[in-house]
Amino acid sequence: MLMMFYWGLSCFLFLMGIFVFVSNRKHLLSMLLSLEYIVLNLFFMLYIYLNMMNYLSFFSMMFLVFSVCEGALGLSVLVSMIRTHGNDYFQTFNIL
């Protein structure tokens, strides 16, 4: 019963993170923060699954390592775009 509550909570939080990511498209930093929120919810879901199946937490540590690398890459892209364009608005970026 409690595990179903955790699964429902994590799915709800994941969907709210997706909604914020889709609806907030003005600044690059806010989109990166919503992506990190989604990654943390995925980590929560992975932790629940691994505890349900009685697996080791080695997989969750690997997931955390890759999510930290993803966050560092996102911040480096943010710094690069701010240095070249002067801000992080999506309206000022030229895709081509």
Image (cartoon, grey):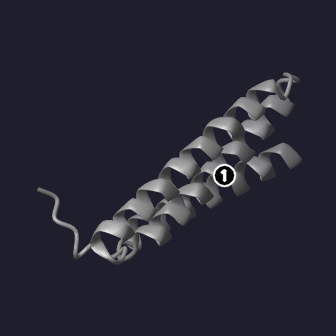
**Compared to 15, does 47 lie above or below?**
above
Q: Amino acid at mark 1?
A: Asn
For residue 46, side relative to residue 25 (left or right): right
Q: How many C-alpha atoms fall within 10 Å of the one at disc 1: few (<14), some, or many (≥20)?
A: many
- Tell me the residue at 23%/76% (across/down): 91
- Tell me the residue at 80%/30% (across/down): 50
Q: Who is closer to the viewer here, 7 or 77?
A: 77
**Compared to 18, does 24 lie above or below?**
below
Q: Which residue is mark 1?
A: 41
Q: Can you give x and y, in whole percent of width and height, for residue 6 in the image?
A: 79, 50
Number of on-image labels: 1
Mark 1 lies on a secondary structure that is helix
Q: Who is closer to the viewer here, 2 or 66?
A: 66
Q: Can you give x and y, in whole percent of width and height, for residue 11 in the image?
A: 63, 52
Q: Who is closer to the viewer here, 77 or 27?
A: 77
Q: Quadrant of the C terminus?
A: bottom left
For residue 74, side relative to residue 93 (left or right): right
**Compared to 16, does 86 lie above or below?**
below
For residue 22, side relative to residue 96 (left or right): right
Where residue 82 sits, quadrant-wise, is: bottom left
Q: Can you give x and y, in whole percent of width and height, for residue 84 in the image?
A: 30, 67
- Tell me the residue at 61%/49% (across/down): 39
